[in-house]
Image: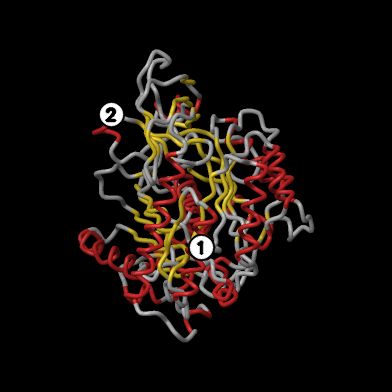
Amino acid sequence: MNGGKTYQIRTFGCQMNVHDSERLAGQLEEAGYVPAGADDAPDLVVFNTCAVRENADNKLYGTLGHLRPAKDANPDMQIAVGGCLAQKDRGEIVKRAPWVDVVFGTHNIGALPVLLERARHNAEAEVEILESLETFPSTLPARRESAYSGWVSISVGCNNTCTFCIVPSLRGKERDRRPGEVLAEVEALVAEGVLEVTLLGQNVNSYGVEFGERDAFSKLLRACGGIDGLERVRFTSPHPAAFTDDVIDAMAETPNVCPQLHMPLQSGSDRVLREMRRSYRSSRFLSILDKVRDRIPDAAITTDIIVGFPGETEEDFQATLDVVREARFSSAFTFQYSKRPGTPAAELPDQLPKQVVQERYDRLVELVNEIAWDENKKLVGRKVELLVAEGEGRKDTETRRMSGRARDGRLVHFTPTGSAIDGSVRPGDVVETVVTYGAPHHLVADGDLLTHRRTRAGDNVEAGRRPKTDGVSLGLPSFGRPAPQPVTTGGCGL
């Protein structure tokens, strides 16, 4: 035990990293650590890193540099670096930042408490990077970040070979959890008041390949529909090449599966898609959207797009704009191509000048915002059900609004007024209201609430409690003090 030593976790990257940080927090608390207060200097700082973006290295080493004076002033303070960048850079981290105590990879996040003790005992840095997964992360305890919404991994790793992506080499081949384990974790979260789960995988559509069940993902979605108290199910991310009609049917026929689809396009140019080794073409992508909208007319569809892939011509870029116009995305995560050492794309000729990429990126963002705004304007006057969120509206205090997510995933800023309010509206509660304004990135609902339902999740938020799951499928989550976790989220563009 660590006698009340305090910890802080700083997370960079995608939802996978955010969920891994929940596992790290759970282990540290089992080992006796407690979350550091917002204004307190922690005894331990853990960085859970991302390696997808070009500036990921600079961001990490810059932040480590800022911590060095604190480490010099308090040699007993420990610093640990894990995640994708740690898996990639390995021993390079302690060479560039010798004040780091522990470096661990994506395959051994369960080793952190032991490595910290070893580093303390030996008074030297411990670097442990495994080449393959030994223990599925779901067997580890987790301090959940949210009382009302939870991540549930259905698989880790990826079997695709996209030329721009470093993730498969850092997270390994796909490993699937058994459906019973997934559902047990979902049920355990719901038993403690969680209303919404997001099923996570690098390619959820290929779920089941490892245990030989082709339609395993659609069956999993339908099974989630049978869990009492589970009000919303989301998933990310599917791969267009593996997207099958049985998944669309399950989405349409399972009431608690949300009318939302996030499916990465990456490029609208078939030539570029071939160079990316994305085994679908733009016509295939658009045909999936047509089928989804035929079965789920109100579905909000979002995507990831990379601008400036090596060799991309103006004609290729125009093809991307054409697909965006036809697809009518409700939003898109847009990225400028980042050259990542170790990926095939990094060795391709015709790497584009920064100014060309920036100019195309600006045009793409302008079009995406224009379409998103048009689509959001269509929702003015529509009634929406919101799961009230915590900390999603940066201007909520000054506007006296609160924020929530509609079932289709759109962010809605609303006014918590009206006779329907029961006591006070809290994050985790569910309200209904009417959209009064549509902006490019959000909706506004400034009328009185139509309904307000207090929930156990809202009770737990009000009391400052967060679920702590004990791993896989045994036992139910317990509650304890929340762990403040500064998080930077963003898609890894898969």
Image point (36%, 73%), residue name: 94
Q: From what the image shows, is residue 143 above or below residue 437?
A: below
Q: What amino acid is labelled 1 in the image?
A: Asp
Left or right relative to 112: residue 298: right
Q: Nearer the viewer, mark 1 or mark 2?
A: 1
Image point (58%, 36%), residue name: 232
In which image quadrant can residue 47 be found? bottom left
Callout 2: SS:
loop
* Image disc number at residue 400: 2
Left or right relative to 206: residue 260: left
Image point (62%, 35%), residue name: 256
Residue 122 locus on image (x, y percent): 40, 67
Mark before the other along the chain sequence, 1 or 2:
1
Residue that protrudes farthest toward the top in the picture: 419
Image point (37%, 16%), residue name: 418
Residue that protrudes farthest toward the bottom in the picture: 349
Q: What amino acid is labelled 2 in the image?
A: Arg
Residue 49 locus on image (x, y percent): 42, 62
Residue 129 is at least partly visible in this image:
yes
Of residues 492 and 30, the one nearer the viewer is 492
How far apart, in angstroms, are the residues tagged by discs 1 and 2? 40 Å
